[in-house]
Amino acid sequence: MSTLTLLRKLKLRKSATKEKIIQFYDEATEDYEFWSKDFNMHFGYYIPFKTNVFKRDSMLNELTHQVFNRLDVPKRNSLVADLGCGIGGSIRYGLRKYPLLSIIGVTLSPFQVREGNKRLKQMNGVILEENYCTTSFKNDSINGAYAIESFCHSGHSREALREAYRIIKPGSRLVIADAFLKKNEDQLCTGSTYCYEQLCKGWSLEGLGSIHDVKTH
């Protein structure tokens, strides 16, 4: 049996069960305060002479800025969905910049719902305890949706994409900022396969979709 075949047989799938995702974020959320004073639970976006590599939050907020720019929704009386919102850092950024928006976030973590909603008081935002693959939103009811490093927990599944398609209005946008594979999983070498499996295990990910497949889907 080849090393690659053995690794595939030993794979720790279902790294992203609902229980493991909730446990991961319940335990890790407070640690993100070290990563970002604004509780941005994602990576940054670097622009020379605009963001500063020594000031992490400038890059983290720039990523959120890029997402809202790409959403391209009317900045007045629009309803936006944050699919996998964490503790609401991106929601707070969006509402501070565009106070006439309304944003609804969803997360599986009761802890994030409780703590996130405390930070959204007096703002046009709320966080619900829901799965972004099966939300309670009505068909064609959302002006735009985004998913910042959250769809990876479902392996960038068709279910997540299909649900986003269901809830957003025709012609509206879904913006995804995430990590992806550049090639299909079965094309990874032995070392990459091992690293990939450890990544999924450590971050409670169902997997990373191939960027080409995700675009097609």
Image (cartoon, helix red, strand yellow):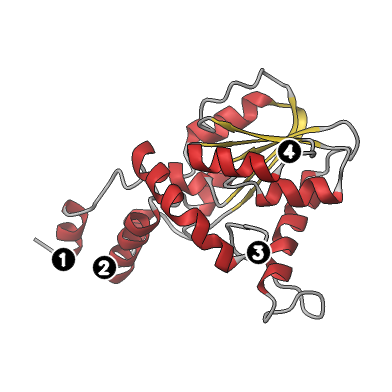
The residue carrying mark 4 is 173
Q: Residue furthest left?
A: 1
Type of amino acid under label 3: Lys
Counting from the top left corner in percent of width and height, residue 40 is at 63, 58
Q: CA distance from mark 4 to mark 1?
A: 43 Å
- Dot 1, how many residues are within 10 Å of its Cα: few (below 14), some (14-19), or many (20+)? few
Q: Name the N-terminal-most of marks 3 and 2.
A: 3
User: Given this view, does label 1 or label 3 mark the residue nearer the observer?
Assistant: 3
Residue 124 pos. (x, y %): 79, 35
Q: Please give the label number shown on residue 37.
A: 3
Residue 105: name its quadrant: top right
Name the residue that disc number 2 marks: 190
Residue 134, above or below 158 = above
**Label 2 – label 4 distance at C-alpha:** 37 Å
User: Exactly how many numbered labels are in the figure?
Assistant: 4
Q: Amino acid at mark 2?
A: Thr
Residue 44 lies left or right of residue 209; in this view the side is: right
Answer with mark 2 or mark 4, whichever residue precedes in sequence. 4
SS at mark 4 in the image: strand
Kindly identify which residue carries mark 1. 3
Judged left or right of residue 14, residue 75 is right
State the residue in front, 37 or 156. 37
Q: Which residue appears at 78% of the width and 48% of the height?
A: 94
Asked if the residue under mark 4 is in contact with the one under mark 2, i.e. CB atoms within 8 Å, the reply is no
Q: Is residue 22 visible?
A: yes
The residue under the point 54% across, 61% down is 32
* Residue 84 visible at all: no
